[in-house]
Image (spheres, grey):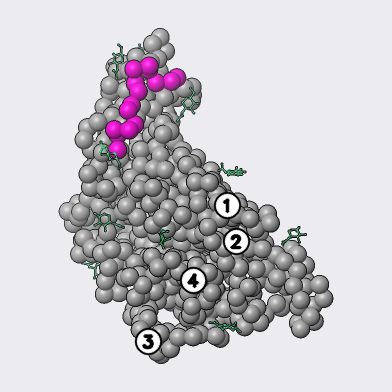
Amino acid sequence: MQLLRNLLPFLCISSSSWRALAGTTYFQSSDYASGALGLGPMQTFKSSSSTPPAWNFVVPFNDSTSGQIESGLIFMAPRGTNVNTPGAMIYDKNGELIWDGTQFGETLTFKMATYKGDPVILLWTGQISGIGVGFGYDLILNNKYEIIANFTAANLNGSLADFHDIQMTSNDTALITAYQAKSWDLSSFNIADGWLLDSVAQEVDPSNGNEIFTWVASDHVDPTSCFASPGTSGTAEDNPWDFFHINSIDKDNAGNYLISSRHCHAIYYVSSSGDIIWTMGGHNSTLTATDGTNFAWQHDVRWHNDETQISLFDNEGTAWELDSSSSRGLLLDFDSSNNSYSTNTQWIPYNVTVSESQGNVGILSSGNTLIGWGQVPYFSEYDANGQFLYVVQFGVGDVQSYRAYHYNWTSTPSTRPSVSVETDGSNTTVYTSWNGATEVDTWQLSGSTADSPQLAIPISNTSRSGFETAISVTDTTKNFTYFQVAAFNSNKKIIAYSNFTASDGTQQNPAANQTVDSSSSNSTGSGSSSSDSIRVVVDGKMIMAVFVAVWTLAFVV
Ligand SMILES: *[C@@H]1O[C@H](CO)[C@@H](O)[C@H](O)[C@H]1NC(C)=O
Ligand SMILES: *[C@@H]1O[C@H](CO)[C@@H](O)[C@H](O)[C@H]1NC(C)=O
Ligand SMILES: *[C@@H]1O[C@H](CO)[C@@H](O)[C@H](O)[C@H]1NC(C)=O
Ligand SMILES: *[C@@H]1O[C@H](CO)[C@@H](O)[C@H](O)[C@H]1NC(C)=O
Ligand SMILES: *[C@@H]1O[C@H](CO)[C@@H](O)[C@H](O)[C@H]1NC(C)=O
Ligand SMILES: *[C@@H]1O[C@H](CO)[C@@H](O)[C@H](O)[C@H]1NC(C)=O
Ligand SMILES: *[C@@H]1O[C@H](CO)[C@@H](O)[C@H](O)[C@H]1NC(C)=O
Ligand SMILES: *[C@@H]1O[C@H](CO)[C@@H](O)[C@H](O)[C@H]1NC(C)=O
Ligand SMILES: *[C@@H]1O[C@H](CO)[C@@H](O)[C@H](O)[C@H]1NC(C)=O
Ligand SMILES: *[C@@H]1O[C@H](CO)[C@@H](O)[C@H](O)[C@H]1NC(C)=O
Ligand SMILES: *[C@@H]1O[C@H](CO)[C@@H](O)[C@H](O)[C@H]1NC(C)=O
Ligand SMILES: *[C@@H]1O[C@H](CO)[C@@H](O)[C@H](O)[C@H]1NC(C)=O
């Protein structure tokens, strides 16, 4: 009876909580937070080899806050030694995987943008060097995850695009970062044959890789005027002194660039001729600041509100120096008429601590703000008054994400859904997932026999339930050898067929008449994830899962 009393109120809560409990998402779990579940708890599936980090909602959303949370999906790129497969990941807001993009490898910049009028993904891919910068290529993926552009830094004597930023402009050009080692006179630091790691901001045309604008930091900023001395660096081409450390670029409609230097604690406003118009922060600020505006080792500097506000992630520390007791998100008001700036808003993390690297601030159109805490494995969404709507922990040990974003993203991938069939005695379960798909509402299961593998007989319909849906085959009167799923969107239209799959993994192609016109399969209307319309079928196993969750919550509350 005790069990039933705990269960009854639970049965009345909203459907979003049902969904979340069905997946591997944790809620205020002390086992997760203490590391009892491992330093990088992860999800696993039958129909996919993906192992995305599992989330622990340290501040869960509830019936009173969930209405304030924007629709959309979370983009992040888990990395670190406790991440099984580092790389780009899209999740829904319940912590269920939507897309595993780890085939592109470990990445830092992973975001959504508009390119030539269409929603796209921007993704850096390449080599991450031991000196904390990258050499690689910037990809643009369309909404089927197909590569439509692959470009890098131009005319930099072989230096390739770095991972710190890719920002699309309204003119369909890309703002990117690059690093270049060059020999430099460091005799004033008693270093003979010195080497400098120069920072480069570039604007390029992704369609042809052409250079539009290049700004080289050492041409404009005296390397000795910043906050990172050479220390043991500067001695060799592969151990150069990173005096500036560019990590973001933005551009306004006036054609000027906003460049963030982490090691100079400064933001440079640069004209299209390369001249510095003003410097905000650092040793050489040219603006007037009020109290509380100081920032240090910052990331992700962006214009807002017609260039009257600037947001940034104020790390307040780095591996060798802490300047405060906590990092913060910061929104500054900028007054160009008298060259001054002041604090508008600051966001303090749930986990009040200094994140020594990475991090970002995403101000959403509703006024909510999503902050990724970078090196510390948390992100949090705040309402317009700066109150937490929810806080997610996505790892315990060395688990990081350079940034975390919240976007409306819809996709019907060009790949097929995956199917895995498990038979246990007389019971057969078909597991299905479709990496990256956002528009599936219902899975229709069909079966066929070895004699006519491509002749499908419909068996059942099951609402999509998270990344992977488990479908029990209850009709034991037929003797199916092969199973296939068809994905229906919320308009009851088929948007994909899987292969026919046997329990030993043998695959048969879909039938010749099972083709889907993918150009007309993107209908949603709402623009939000299909997970918003999931209905969960409550069966015996689900109720057991809920029992476990009730007891877990009862112990921690
Ligand atoms: C819902 O969550 C918010 C934010 O964590 C909290 O302040 C509020 O007390 C919660 N409300 C209920 C009914 O649990
Ligand atoms: C991008 O282009 C580079 C240079 O051609 C190539 O080496 C790399 O494999 C491409 N990346 C992808 C994901 O295709
Ligand atoms: C280009 O790179 C080569 C090889 O590292 C170097 O010898 C040369 O000085 C560089 N040229 C310029 C203009 O930086
Ligand atoms: C300080 O900035 C001004 C332009 O804003 C520039 O002329 C000057 O060289 C800078 N000084 C140093 C030490 O970087
Ligand atoms: C877009 O191009 C126009 C025309 O060249 C230019 O005036 C404007 O500054 C550009 N805007 C951006 C954001 O690059
Ligand atoms: C806050 O983050 C730090 C660094 O990851 C970690 O050591 C600490 O345990 C966290 N504290 C909480 C309350 O999660
Ligand atoms: C997604 O779209 C909805 C409807 O237009 C909008 O209210 C919401 O703010 C958007 N979410 C994000 C994260 O942009
Ligand atoms: C479907 O079968 C083909 C071979 O016929 C195979 O190449 C493909 O990877 C299969 N697709 C999935 C999603 O399993
Ligand atoms: C088949 O599933 C039912 C319901 O879950 C269960 O009671 C039964 O023991 C299972 N049979 C086998 C052979 O696993
Ligand atoms: C199902 O298939 C197996 C193996 O082909 C066969 O032994 C069995 O008789 C079949 N059962 C029915 C009901 O057709
Ligand atoms: C494909 O053809 C088979 C055999 O004619 C038919 O039973 C089935 O309904 C067709 N499927 C579709 C999607 O048209
Ligand atoms: C598919 O997307 C395109 C571009 O967003 C849109 O114009 C078209 O109406 C959509 N198709 C359907 C069936 O919704």
The numbered mark, 4 or 1, whose residue comes first in the sequence reads 1
**Residue 182 at what x, y percent from top left?**
72, 66
Query: Is residue 248 magenta-colored?
Result: no
Q: Amino acid at mark 2?
A: Ala
Q: Answer yes or no: disc 1 within 8 Å of ligand 2.
A: yes
Separation (CA) of disc 1 from disc 2: 9 Å
User: What span is in magenta?
Assistant: 508-522
Check disc 3 and report the residue beneath it: 338
Query: At 79% from the left edge and 77% from the top edge, which residue is drawn?
Result: 191
Check disc 1 and report the residue beneath it: 152
**Residue 58 at what x, y percent from top left?**
37, 65
Separation (CA) of disc 4 from disc 1: 23 Å
The numbered mark, 2 or 3, whose residue comes first in the sequence reads 2
Q: Amino acid at mark 3?
A: Asn
Query: At 46% from the left edge and 59% from the top edge, which residue is drawn?
Result: 167
Check disc 2 and report the residue beneath it: 178
Q: Amino acid at mark 1?
A: Thr
Q: Amino acid at mark 4?
A: Ser
Which residue is farthest right? Answer: 192
